[in-house]
Image: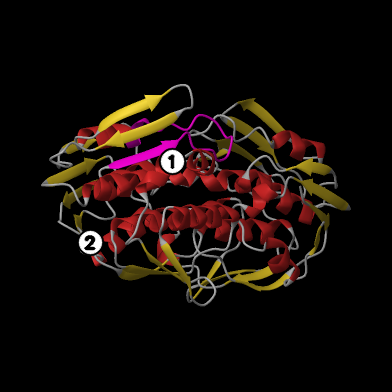
Amino acid sequence: MGIFKIEGGTPLKGEITPQGAKNEALQILCAVLLTGDKVKINNIPDIIDINKLITLLGNLGVKIQRNEPGSITFQADEVNVGYLETEAFKKEGGALRGSIMIVGPLLARFGKGYIPKPGGDKIGRRRLDTHFEGFINLGAKFRYNREDHFYGVESPKEGLKGTDMLLDEASVTGTANIVMAAVLAKGTTTVYNAACEPYLQQLCKMLNSMGANITGVGSNLLTIEGVESLGGCEHTILPDMIEIGSWIGLAAMTKSEITIKNVSWENLGLIPNTFRKLGITIEKRGDDIYIPAHKDGYEVKTDIDGSILTIADAPWPGFTPDLLSIVLVVATQAKGDVLIHQKMFESRLFFVDKLIDMGAKIMLCDPHRAVVMGHNFESQLKATTMSSPDIRAGISLLIAALSAKGTSTIQNIEQIDRGYERIDERLRAIGAKIVRA
């Protein structure tokens, strides 16, 4: 397993361009299974999780033609559905949580979809009920093998049938899976309490360009008129908002002057203003973000009544849970206190012990809440050796190490590589002292 050696305390400077959005790419790549025509996808991030999904599609028989870097043409005209019941698939499909989203397209087009219990970050309980309850509402029969944790859905002979459904939670992947199944169902499907993140909107726009009929895109009520078949298209993935938020935090903590290029401002939601509440200066320059060097630090803004600032996650258009780890680490070097409330996942804050070892003042109240007691910016974190527990905690620890005094070691960096493309090379390009070993 690889490690990063990081010499911290060096201000960075320059421009950095965010990669394509991982969470959008997982949905978009699964959608190529809905048609036998060619589908060209641009701005695909070159990261472990996405490459695993591309390999899985290839093993299912999808033709893969690599164009210029980040661009791939897929054609699912000879899908081997039988591969779903092999031991190789049980091992491969379970290694990636995003593989759950192949089930909806396969069910819609081929009448059946199987998946082993998906893996992914160990950040707490991550239910699959929303996915399968949606498929059942469309008429599919559900089965679950408890011995090998294998899930399966099969459509009746007459095919899937549109219906009205109210989701028990606004699950992004659940909504995506249900939408991809419903586009080829007979009749009309309405999905209330649907997720409405930009990446889900992107999926719906892509499906419409393929011939689907989805209205209400961007709201929590989607209406899907089923069609007979879908055709090919070309689609470009948005920049990754989580990586953009990571670079904002990095710039502030390392007192660096950084420009983040081509961020798609209209799809960032509350992200810029949430970091501004921590006292970080963020300027909009065209479609770029400019962050000046915070040489005198940054100070947390209290609520109007003077009470402690609380930053909590919520379904879109609320603040994304994937950036709470970044906000927490940035708050350790702010002037003022912040309450971080992670509502969705009960294990995501457990990495704070590593920050405490570095000198951060954090009180973990319970699995969902932590109080970060800021201090003077001159009170720098100190270097240490640590291990990355998941993607988002891993990048947070990397940012902490880049701001800390001394040389830090981060182990289990495969977790970071799962979500961030060539991160060491890109950081070195703006002056970071980081070595992969």
Please give the residue where the numbered disc 2 appears in the rendered image: 230
Residue type pointed to by label 2: Leu
Decide: is 411 above or below 245: above
Residue positioned 58% across, 37% down in the render: 340
Check if residue 100 falls in the magenta segment: no
How crowded pointer 1 is (Cα within 10 Å; few <14, some 14-19, many 20+) is rated as some
Nearer-the-camera pick, 119 or 374:
119
Residue 72 percent location from the top left of the image: 46, 69
Decide: is 141 above or below 358: above
Residue positioned 46% across, 58% down in the render: 58
Residue type pointed to by label 1: Ala
393 relative position to 63: left or right? right
Residue 318 percent location from the top left of the image: 42, 46
Q: Looking at the image, is mark 2 or mark 1 earlier in the sequence?
A: 2
Numbered range of the magenta stretch:
112-131
Residue positioned 48% across, 69% down in the render: 43
421 relative position to 209: left or right? right
41 relative position to 108: left or right? right
Residue positioned 57% across, 63% down in the render: 46
Answer yes or no: is residue 315 visible.
Answer: no
Residue 353: quadrant of the picture: top right
Asked which secondary structure carries label 2, the reply is loop
Residue 224 percent location from the top left of the image: 18, 51
Q: Residue furthest right?
A: 406
Q: Residue furthest left?
A: 187
Check if residue 119 falls in the magenta segment: yes
Name the disc covering residue 314, or none.
Answer: 1
Residue 190 percent location from the top left of the image: 18, 43
Asked which secondary structure carries label 1, the reply is loop
